[in-house]
Image (cartoon, rainbow, N blue to C red):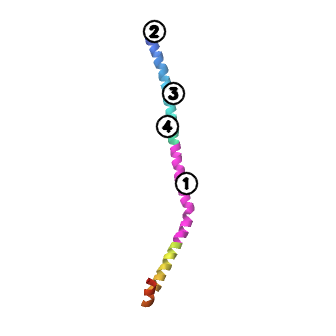
Amino acid sequence: MGDDERKLLTENLELSRKVLGIVKKMERRIFWQRALKTAKWVVIIALTILGFWQIQPYLNNVLNLYQGLLGTLNQTQGIQNNLPAELQKLLVQ
């Protein structure tokens, strides 16, 4: 083996070690990117579920009020249908 071949092999070995170091850094960065992305989605989903759980009593109250309003409107419609024809014509105008 000549000096030129030994020199080329030595340079190749140095470059291979540098590339290996860069690849290891890239793998670490990819691992942490995936871990943080997963953590971000876990937090988003958890906050969404927690928010829905916290707002659910208020939504139930609004739904109950809406159902009560519908019941009142149905009663009003029933009363309006029982009025004499002349009063119904006045209400329509």
- Amino acid type indicated by mark 3: Gly
Secondary structure type for disc 4: helix
| Mark 2 or mark 1, earlier in chain | 2
**Circle 2 sits on which residue?**
3
- Amino acid type indicated by mark 1: Leu
Question: For residue 21, which numbered disc appears in the image?
Answer: 3
Decide: is 34 above or below 88.
Answer: above
Packing grade of label 1 (10 A; few <14, some 14-19, many >=20) is few
Residue 67 point in image, percent of width and height: 50, 74
In the picture, residue 6 is in which quadrant?
Answer: top left
**Circle 4 sits on which residue?**
30
- Amino acid type indicated by mark 4: Ile
- Amino acid type indicated by mark 2: Asp
Secondary structure type for disc 3: helix
Tell me if label 2 and label 4 are in contact, CB under 8 Å.
no
- The quarter of the image holding the C terminus is bottom left
Question: For residue 65, which numbered disc appears in the image?
Answer: none
Q: Is residue 28 magenta?
A: no
| Mark 2 or mark 3, earlier in chain | 2
Residues drawn in magenta: 36-64
| Mark 1 or mark 4, earlier in chain | 4
| Mark 4 or mark 3, earlier in chain | 3
Mark 1 vs mark 4, CA separation in Å: 26 Å
Farthest-out residue, top: 2
Residue 57 point in image, percent of width and height: 56, 66
Residue at 48% across / 21% down in the picture?
15
Residue 22 point in image, percent of width and height: 50, 28
